Image (cartoon, rainbow, N blue to C red):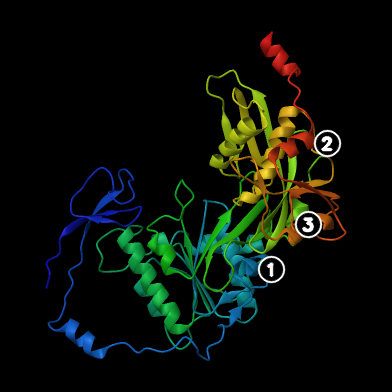
């Protein structure tokens, strides 16, 4: 039997080092190493040869298995993000900022399944039972037959729910508070997270119980703990949104039983989270026509087309290094668009502060938003609004060319459904017939010419020059 020894485990990536250093050698994070006691492993003599004699049972790829059954929660946006509902025996991980509504959404989904006659157990390690009951009363769910428990020991939880009458859904709130007895590290450490998740996932596969793990996130927005935790589960969901907005977005960044990057949109109300069936209309509800520095982007989130307003403000800067502030988009792509506008279109972007915002709290990640961002920037710089009732989408290359994007027809149908008459798009081989009018562009300079020339003699610049 190997003797136990002390090792240093990185709490960010799970890398194990024999001695302490200020920086992890794997993920290069500072001050993340924590000393833990390595468990002794007993290995019977001849174990390797015994396993070798047992061998593997190999089979072909063709079989009679079907898609496992799903449990529909009845919450349309949540079922959409999951690919149609909760799969029996699956392990799901839900992460999000504190106070964003993770426990509220989970409690609503658990109550919907319990009302439909499914067995549901909700285990909390952070709050007391009274706090959960108060939340249920606020949501009007106090009469739902949910089994409520308060525990932090994985062994105690599994001893209660493991049996012939195992529940259909087991909720763990949160996985960072769980611990496995016999391991010295404190709850929330890499060793405890890995061991607790492994035991819960093994129970899910054995009994066919769907397990939903709620996880904390770091200041960078990633789920706290090693990335191996996201590899272990079947589905990883992120709950996004700004506290100043009433919109909440659940995004499936990983899904073994459905499409990835699918989203569901909710509206935060006093009585809980309300699904939004038409998010495009909601995101554009407060939009004003004829405002310089605004463009409507027709994007695709998962399989759903969504229209959202991109806002930009370009202003003269008194600073030696102008500000670049971005909300809801990639700051590196903004720097690229600014460079292309200056190098390929002759627009002077240096010496100006640039602020970019995606209205509604939605985070856009697809390159198809490049042309809409460029339209908003040029509109603000020229102090001319983008032509009314127009949507914009397309990818911009470093040479200033505009490249086509996927699912063009779905974007145009969504825009036409909401009353838009024109679309600024890349040149297409087979433009759709009828419907919305298309303004095809091949170069970014075409977009600049469409919006209008940049007037350099604006009042603010004249005031600064004076």
Residue 210 versus residue 354 in the image, above or below: below
Q: Circle 2 sits on which residue?
A: 290
Q: Quadrant of residue 156?
A: bottom left
Q: Quadrant of residue 324?
A: top right
The reply to whether dot 3 and dot 2 touch (C-beta < 8 Å) is no
Q: Residue at x 51, y 80 (%)?
A: 167
43 on left or right of 247: left
427 on left or right of 331: right
Question: Percent from the top left, x then y, of residue 336?
Answer: 57, 38
Distance of mark 1 from mark 2, alpha carbons? 35 Å
Q: Nearer the viewer, residue 314 or 186?
A: 314
Residue 388 versus residue 105 in the image, above or below: above
Q: Earlier in the sequence, mark 1 or mark 2?
A: 1
Label 3 sits on a secondary structure element that is: helix
Q: Does any portion of residue 179 appear in the rendered image?
A: no
Q: Which mark is residue 76?
A: 1
Specify the quadrant that holds the C terminus: top right
Q: Residue at x 22, y 45 (%)?
A: 21
Question: Percent from the top left, x then y, of residue 63?
Answer: 50, 90
Distance of mark 3 from mark 2, alpha carbons? 21 Å
371 on left or right of 415: left
Q: Circle 3 sits on which residue?
A: 412
Question: Percent from the top left, x then y, of residue 168?
Answer: 53, 80
Label 2 sits on a secondary structure element that is: loop
Distance of mark 1 from mark 3, alpha carbons? 24 Å
């Amino acid at each position: 039997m190997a003797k136990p020894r002390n090792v240093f485990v990185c709490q960010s990536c799970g890398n194990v080092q024999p001695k302490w250093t200020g920086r992890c050698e794997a993920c290069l994070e500072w001050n993340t190493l924590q000393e833990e006691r390595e468990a002794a492993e007993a290995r019977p003599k001849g174990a390797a040869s015994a396993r070798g004699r047992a061998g593997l049972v190999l089979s072909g790829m063709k079989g009679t298995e079907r898609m496992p059954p799903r449990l529909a929660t009845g919450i349309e946006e949540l079922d959409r993000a999951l690919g149609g509902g909760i799969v029996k025996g699956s392990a799901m991980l839900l992460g999000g900022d504190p106070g964003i509504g993770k426990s509220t959404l989970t409690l609503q989904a658990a109550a919907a399944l319990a009302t439909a006659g499914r067995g549901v157990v909700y285990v909390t390690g952070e709050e007391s039972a009274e706090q959960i009951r108060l939340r249920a009363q606020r949501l009007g769910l106090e009469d739902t037959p949910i089994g409520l428990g308060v525990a932090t020991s994985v062994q105690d939880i599994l001893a209660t729910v493991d049996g012939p009458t195992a529940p259909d859904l087991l909720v763990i709130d949160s996985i960072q508070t769980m611990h496995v007895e016999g391991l010295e590290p404190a709850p929330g450490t890499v060793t405890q997270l890995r061991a607790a998740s492994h035991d819960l996932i093994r129970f899910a596969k054995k009994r066919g119980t769907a397990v939903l793990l709620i996880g904390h996130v770091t200041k960078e927005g990633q789920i706290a703990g090693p990335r191996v935790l996201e590899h272990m589960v079947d589905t990883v969901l992120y709950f996004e949104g700004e506290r100043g907005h009433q919109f909440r977005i659940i995004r499936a960044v990983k899904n073994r039983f459905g499409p990835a990057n699918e989203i569901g949109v909710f509206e935060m109300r006093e009585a809980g989270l309300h699904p939004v069936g038409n998010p495009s209309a909601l995101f554009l509800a407060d939009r004003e026509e004829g405002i310089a520095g605004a463009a409507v982007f027709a994007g695709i989130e998962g399989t759903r087309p969504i229209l959202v307003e991109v806002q930009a403000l370009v202003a003269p800067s008194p600073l030696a290094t102008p500000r670049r502030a971005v909300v809801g988009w990639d700051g590196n792509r903004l720097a690229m668009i600014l460079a292309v506008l200056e190098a390929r279109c002759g627009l002077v972007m240096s010496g100006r502060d640039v602020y970019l915002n995606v209205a509604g709290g939605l985070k856009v990640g697809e390159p198809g938003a490049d042309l809409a961002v460029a339209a908003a920037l040029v509109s603000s710089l020229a102090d001319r609004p983008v032509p009314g009732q127009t949507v914009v989408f397309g990818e911009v290359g470093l040479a200033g060319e505009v490249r086509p994007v996927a699912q063009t027809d779905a974007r145009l149908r969504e825009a036409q459904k909401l009353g838009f008459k024109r679309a600024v798009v890349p040149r297409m081989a087979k433009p759709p017939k009828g419907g919305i009018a298309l303004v095809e562009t091949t170069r970014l300079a075409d977009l600049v010419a469409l919006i209008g020339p940049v007037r350099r003699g604006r009042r603010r610049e004249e005031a600064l020059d004076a």
